């Protein structure tokens, strides 16, 4: 009797679990609409969600099945990609890889078994809808308590909204790659360089760049944007309220088409607790650089009853986003002075000599720091192994002598990839089964971008085997930084910290550097893998990844293209 | 006749570009662009006034483009076309910075018409010199060559000083169009432009000096014409 009761109770509990796991579907609706984007300085027609750009913040819960109905009110096809979410590939939202796309007037229902937590975002993967405004944020509440405390939280979505449409921008870049670069070196710069360095040195330096037909000012392809925080221009001043001494969690998302931002909150130390949705061991920083498509969660604790500025200057200093953390509505923070000394690329960023890839010479790394043009062993530049370089004082994820190496505005701590350590390893450590080299290639003058010299349209897919652990070797042979995003599976960034290597969805590779990441191939299907700079992606720095084998291989082989 | 030719060629180019730009909506690998490097009024000594243009338009992919190149000189005093040239070429990359091109050229000035076949290269030479070098063979079997070089000097990021050079040479004499063997003509220019609207509209002022050379100059002298001229120019550089 007792045993029978116990047994039925057990069945009851099991049934309850079974019911709850199917009944915990949560419904969300998104419409894709033409919207007006008004930054104060400009008014453009763009694309948004539920009538606005940016779209809403979706709050999902770990463990639920998110059922998201997306209705396309545009007169062109659309799609939504859930950036960083681990899901069945048919739900990943990349036209021609995951699904056919969402035709005008149609509704597509995404079913996402939510198996993770953290800060993510979503955006269109069709044409140039994302630069045109089709993006929004995702917060996934964890099942378990988080390893840090906060009293309130805000999503801080950064965007480089340009007055030109995405299609027009790419056409202009194809016509004239420096169409938007109004920070080129002029006669005045030549004269001031002559007075500083002498005529001969200046002429030979100009000659070096001229013989390569490259520009040291070529850090951002598309200046001329208005930097937005949560859709608000600096003038419109997005404001997050706080009470003194509260711990405020800021979920930074860079939803920009092309722009990296250097983010600081003068007067406040930021504790980085999460990167790309995964908790990291807390790091206190004064400033951090957020690549396109990355997310960083930071916690700040303003003690004074006064407004603080959130300042996000673009990496090339051509633009900025600004907002306030304020004790009361309408109280605007004072905007910190912009750093107008735009960085210049150096020969180190050019990689100079790609012929000699392997190995790294520590002695040449420690030199060549002050003057990048002189006395540097260029042959070793492209072959640096960052995992071995964490002990170096400079950020090892930039070429030694790079003009892009960031410095905190207050002279303090600037976050490096080398600082990121996983809070809790997601996967057991094991050696990679094989290495795949991906050379990031392109021709700035033609504005063509590719991987291993081959554009997407001409390339064979990358074939991975379900169950393997693949090591990607990214060799950046271009003069630009590229945020590489693998869909559907995590990228474990090799920072040399072994099992504590951080787990990311987007890995930035700076010019003239080599970066490694490893992926446990644990999701079947086919996935996109690309540079997240919109116009690099559209120009061909993109690959399809096919995972062969695994549970859903039958579905794939049964004609899902 | 000339107006008709211009209309026909212009209309053809426009139609091609429009049809491509409509398909480009579906395929984002096809691009197009229209550029007028020179679109100017020239005033010389002895109230010689000219209207001059030099432009090009393209449509196509990274690998293959159809390009129209056209230039002309209308003598406003005597109401005739001193030069009226249209080229249609296919163009494909041959190196990081250079494209090869091949196609046809039709000259329809007020004097004598000529058809040509043409091959050439265009691209960006070291130290930022824009180069266009072409070979021509006319319907009469006469060969000629042309070199165009241009450099954009940035006084500021919007105020741009552009020196340019055009040099023509003929491999044989074609008396009907009054071209002699050897270097036949040269033109040097210096234009100061200001980017008014993006890169789309840039008004400029400048000077242009053109001179017929060698035997070609002799043809002009024999006709009692000037073989050299200096002009003040005002115009617009356009890019769409």
Image (cartoon, coloured by chain):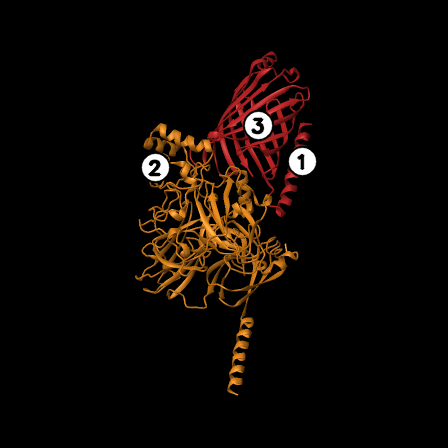
Chain colours: A orange, B red
3 and 1 marks on the same chain: yes
Question: Within 10 Å of the Cα at label 1, are there few (<14), some (14-19), or many (20+) other Cα atoms?
Answer: few
Q: What residue is shown at x 64% (from left), y 41% (from top)?
A: B20
Q: Which quarter of the figure has residue A151?
A: bottom left
Q: Is residue B153 visible?
A: no
**Above or below A18: residue B166:** above
Q: Is residue A540 visible?
A: yes
Q: CA distance from mark 1 to mark 2?
A: 55 Å
1 and 2 marks on the same chain: no
Tell me residue B19's x, y (percent): 66, 42
Q: Residue furthest bottom?
A: A1
> In this orientation, which residue lies closer to the viewer: B234 or B116?
B116
- Residue designated by label 3: B52
Tell me residue A56's x, y (percent): 50, 61
Q: Tell me the quarter of the image containing the C terminus of chain B.
A: top right
Chain for mark 2? A
Chain for mark 3? B
Chain for mark 1? B
| Sequence-earlier tag: 3 or 1 | 1
Instruction: Please tell me whether mark 1 or mark 2 is closer to you in this view.
Output: 2
Q: Secondary structure at mark 2?
A: loop
- Residue designated by label 2: A371
Instruction: Please tell me whether mark 3 or mark 2 is closer to you in this view.
Output: 2
**Above or below A306: residue A169:** above
Q: CA distance from mark 3 to mark 1?
A: 21 Å
Q: What residue is shown at x 37% (from left), y 37% (from top)?
A: A372
- Given contact means CB atoms under 8 Å apart, are the residues at marks 3 and 1 in contact? no
Q: Secondary structure at mark 1?
A: helix
- Residue designated by label 1: B12
């Amino acid at each position: 009797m007792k045993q029978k009761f116990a047994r039925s109770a057990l069945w009851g509990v099991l049934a309850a679990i079974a019911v709850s796991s199917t009944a915990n579907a949560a419904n969300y609706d998104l419409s894709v609409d033409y919207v007006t984007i008004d930054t104060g300085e400009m008014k453009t027609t763009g694309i948004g969600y539920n009538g606005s750009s940016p779209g809403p913040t979706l709050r999902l819960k770990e463990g639920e099945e998110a059922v998201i109905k997306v209705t396309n009110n545009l007169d062109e096809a659309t799609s939504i990609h859930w950036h960083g979410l681990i899901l069945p590939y048919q739900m990943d939202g990349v036209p021609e890889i995951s699904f056919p796309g969402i035709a005008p007037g149609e509704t597509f229902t995404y079913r996402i078994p939510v198996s993770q937590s953290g800060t993510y975002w979503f955006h269109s993967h069709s044409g140039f809808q994302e630069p045109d405004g089709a993006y929004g944020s995702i917060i996934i509440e964890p099942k378990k308590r988080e390893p840090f405390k906060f009293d309130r939280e805000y999503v801080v979505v950064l965007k480089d909204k340009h007055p030109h449409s995405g299609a027009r921008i790419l056409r202009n870049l194809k016509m004239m790659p420096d169409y938007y670069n109004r920070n080129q070196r002029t006669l005045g710069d030549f004269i001031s360089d002559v007075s500083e360095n002498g005529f001969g040195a200046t002429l030979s330096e100009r000659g070096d760049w001229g013989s390569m037909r490259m520009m040291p000012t070529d850090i951002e392809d598309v200046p001329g944007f208005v930097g937005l925080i949560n859709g608000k221009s600096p003038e419109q001043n997005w404001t997050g309220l706080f009470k003194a001494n509260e711990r405020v969690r800021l979920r930074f998302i860079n939803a920009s088409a092309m722009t990296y931002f250097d983010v600081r909150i003068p007067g406040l130390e930021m504790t980085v607790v999460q990167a790309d949705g995964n908790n990291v061991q807390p790091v206190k920083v004064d400033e951090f650089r957020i690549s396109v498509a990355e997310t960083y969660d930071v916690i700040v604790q303003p003690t004074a009853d006064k407004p603080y500025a959130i300042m996000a200057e673009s990496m090339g200093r051509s633009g900025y986003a600004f907002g306030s953390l304020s004790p009361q509505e309408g109280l605007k923070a004072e905007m910190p002075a912009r750093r107008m000394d735009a960085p210049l690329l150096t020969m180190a960023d050019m990689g100079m000599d790609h012929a000699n890839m392997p190995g790294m010479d520590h002695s040449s790394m420690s030199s060549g720091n002050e003057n990048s043009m002189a006395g540097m062993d260029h042959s070793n530049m492209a072959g640096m192994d960052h995992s071995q370089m964490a002990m170096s004082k400079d950020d090892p994820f930039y070429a030694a002598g790079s003009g892009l190496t960031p410095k905190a505005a207050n002279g303090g701590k600037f976050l490096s990839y080398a600082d990121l350590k996983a809070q809790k390893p997601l996967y057991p450590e094991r050696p990679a089964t094989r290495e795949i080299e991906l050379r990031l290639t392109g021709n700035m003058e033609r504005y063509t971008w590719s991987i291993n010299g081959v554009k997407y349209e001409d390339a064979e897919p990358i074939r991975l085997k379900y169950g393997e652990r693949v090591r990607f070797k990214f060799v950046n042979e271009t003069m630009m930084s590229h945020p590489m995003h693998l869909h559907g599976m995590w990228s474990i960034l090799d920072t040399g910290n072994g099992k504590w290597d951080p787990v990311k969805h987007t890995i930035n590779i700076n010019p003239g550097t080599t970066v490694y990441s490893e992926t446990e191939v644990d999701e079947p299907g086919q996935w996109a893998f690309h540079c997240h700079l919109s116009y690099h992606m559209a120009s061909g720095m993109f690959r399809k990844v096919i995972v062969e084998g695994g549970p859903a291989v039958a579905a794939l082989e049964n004609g899902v293209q | 006749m000339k107006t008709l030719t211009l209309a026909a060629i212009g209309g053809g180019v426009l139609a091609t570009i429009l049809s491509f730009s409509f398909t480009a909506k579906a395929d984002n690998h096809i691009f197009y662009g229209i550029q007028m490097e020179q679109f100017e009024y020239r005033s010389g000594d002895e109230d010689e006034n000219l209207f001059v243009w030099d432009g090009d338009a393209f449509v196509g992919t990274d690998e293959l483009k159809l390009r129209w190149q056209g230039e002309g000189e209308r003598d406003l005093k005597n109401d005739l076309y001193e030069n009226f040239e249209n080229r249609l070429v296919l163009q494909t990359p041959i190196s990081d910075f250079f494209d090869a091109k091949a196609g046809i050229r039709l000259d329809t000035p007020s004097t004598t018409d000529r058809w040509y076949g043409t091959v050439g290269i265009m691209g960006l030479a070291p130290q930022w010199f824009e180069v266009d070098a072409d070979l021509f063979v006319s319907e009469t079997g006469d060969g000629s060559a042309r070199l165009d070089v241009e450099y954009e000097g940035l006084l500021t990021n919007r105020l741009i000083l552009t020196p340019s050079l055009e040099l023509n040479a003929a491999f044989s004499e074609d008396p009907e169009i009054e071209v002699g063997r050897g270097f036949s003509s040269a033109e040097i220019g210096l234009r100061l432009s200001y980017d008014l609207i993006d890169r789309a509209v840039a008004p400029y002022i400048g000077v242009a000096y053109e001179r017929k050379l060698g035997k070609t100059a002799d043809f002009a002298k024999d006709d009692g014409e000037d073989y050299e001229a200096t002009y003040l120019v005002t115009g617009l550089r356009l890019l769409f």
